[in-house]
Amino acid sequence: MRLDRFLSNLPRFNRQDVRQLLASGRVRVDGQVSRDGRDQVRVFSCIELDAEVLQAGKAARYFMLHKPVGVVSATEHPEHRTVLDLLDAPDKHELHLAGRLDLNTSGLLLITNDGQWSRRVTAPSGKQPKVYLVDSEDPIDPACIEAFARGLYFRFEDLVTRPAELQILAPRQARLTLYEGRYHQVKRMFGHFQNKVVGLHRLSVGAIQLDERLCPGQYRALTAEEIAGFANH
Ligand code: URA
């Protein structure tokens, strides 16, 4: 929210006070004097008035998890174990998922408490590549390569999928790069060719690759470089 809104939400300041505090240079956000009430502040911002801390600023947290098959991409579920059950992080109820994978899909899942960051990861307009390893029941028809590159019509959403890159690695295995994330997209694309996906594993999202050292169910904090890949430039 805007800094002036944050300050005037505090019971002790009215709008006039806020204007004066800002103009006098007494307010600092993350250590920098801020005189502009339009500046954006977040739960992660440290906001100070003189030497008094008005908001300490929560730590932003970012994880990658190697999601195993059979664990649900949700923070709560009545039947299945959830990906949050795999995390041993303090205040993990404050975390949410930056994207989802189906119950029987494995691979890279991003988890954070930073809503702006996760919106950038999942934004349909973001066009960040998502790379999957696909195992299919039947041999993959080479005609898929061109059809996926052209885009397929999804009747339910009434849209044509964005051009996707398919690289056939073996008769029943391929690497597929998508630039969007529609519901069951990979399975529906192969379904278009009457081929069933029997194994699906996500290797990367944008520049973030699943760390090969992570076994299914393991996770680690993202590095500053990985986080910055989805920073607000
Ligand atoms: N496409 C699918 O069909 N399932 C996933 O989990 C991810 C992409």
Image (tube, rainbow, N blue to C red):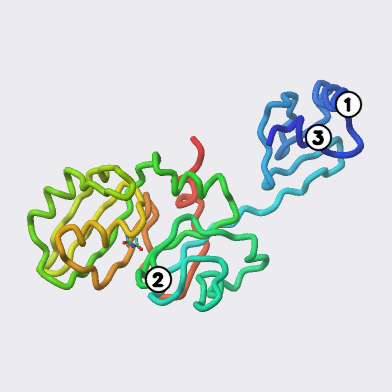
x, y percent for residue 18 = 84, 27
Along the line of sight, the residue nearer the viewer: 177 or 226? 177
Q: Give the answer, above or below, for where 24 lies relative to 74.
A: above
Quadrant showing the N terminus: top right
Residue type, label 2: Leu
Left or right for 79, reference 66: right
Task: Decide which of tag 1 and tag 3 comes sooner along the chain.
Answer: 3
Task: Decide which of tag 3 and tag 2 comes sooner along the chain.
Answer: 3
x, y percent for residue 88 = 59, 73
Gap in angstroms between the C-alphas marked 1 and 3: 9 Å
Left or right for 170, reference 41: left
Residue at 31% across, 46% down? 179
Label 3 neighbour load within 10 Å: few <14, some 14-19, many 20+: many
Ligand 1: does it lie within 8 Å of the C-beta at label 2? no
- The residue beneath circle 3 is 7
Label 1 neighbour load within 10 Å: few <14, some 14-19, many 20+: few
Contact between labelled residues 3 and 1, with CB atoms less than 8 Å apart? yes
Residue type, label 3: Leu
Residue at 40% across, 63% down? 101
Q: Give the answer, above or below, for where 79 lies relative to 51.
A: below
- The residue beneath circle 2 is 103
x, y percent for residue 183 = 36, 56
